[in-house]
Amino acid sequence: MCGVRYLGNDFKTVFFGFPLYFMDQDQARAAAQQVMFDFGELYVAEEPKDGVLISGMSLSQNMPNPFTRKTVISYQLSYAGNVSLKVYNIAGQLVKTLVHERQERGAYSIHWDSKDDHGKVASSGVYFYRLQVDERSIIKKMTLLR
């Protein structure tokens, strides 16, 4: 197996030297989950026979980035949970709470109009957005240009 990652456009490619159908189903699933974990993509979920939930989530890079007025943040949940999506400035101060609710499994997209929680337009700079589902979280960086 050989994995290749191109960071420029967040493009990720994995090549297997053999078809996955030569492996039994559990081995193929474990291999795919390991590759996704290695690349930081954790949204594979399943409910094994023993009832224990293997869960994950993914947070995409905002689009466009950098942006001037509006951007879209997309994420995917493989299980229902208490979801928080917040934007922070470079000093770690909360700028905007975009989501704070229980959400079901699925794909979501949130628009941020570059305004803070008080309706004031945010200044140019680097911001961080944090997706938290129950006890797990992912943070990504974005740039606002005025």
Image: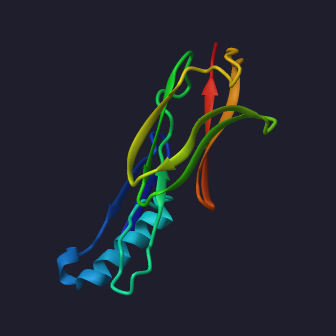
Residue appearing at x 71%, y 24% in the figure: 125
Q: Position of residue 29 (x, y in %)?
A: 32, 75
Of residues 14 and 134, the one nearer the viewer is: 134
Q: Residue furthest front?
A: 102
Residue appearing at x 46%, y 67% in the figure: 55
* Left or right placement of residue 95 versus residue 43 in this view: right
- Residue 145 lies in quadrant: top right
* Left or right placement of residue 123 versus residue 135 in this view: right
Q: Position of residue 53 (x, y in %)?
A: 44, 74
Of residues 102 and 119, the one nearer the viewer is: 102
* Left or right placement of residue 65 versus residue 127 in this view: left
Residue appearing at x 31%, y 83% in the figure: 27
In the rendered picture of this protein, how many numbered marks are placed on residues?
0
Q: Residue furthest right?
A: 91
Query: Is residue 85 depicted above or below 82 in this figure?
Result: above
Q: How is the image coloured?
A: rainbow
Of residues 89 and 20, the one nearer the viewer is: 89
Name the image quarter holding the C terminus: top right
Query: Is residue 125 depicted above or below 11 in this figure?
Result: above
- Residue 141 lies in quadrant: top right
Q: Position of residue 73 (x, y in %)?
A: 49, 35
- Residue 115 lies in quadrant: top right
Name the image quarter holding the N terminus: bottom left
Q: Position of residue 137 (x, y in %)?
A: 61, 55
Of residues 53 and 21, the one nearer the viewer is: 53
Residue appearing at x 37%, y 78% in the figure: 30
Query: Is residue 69 depicted above or below 57 in this figure?
Result: above
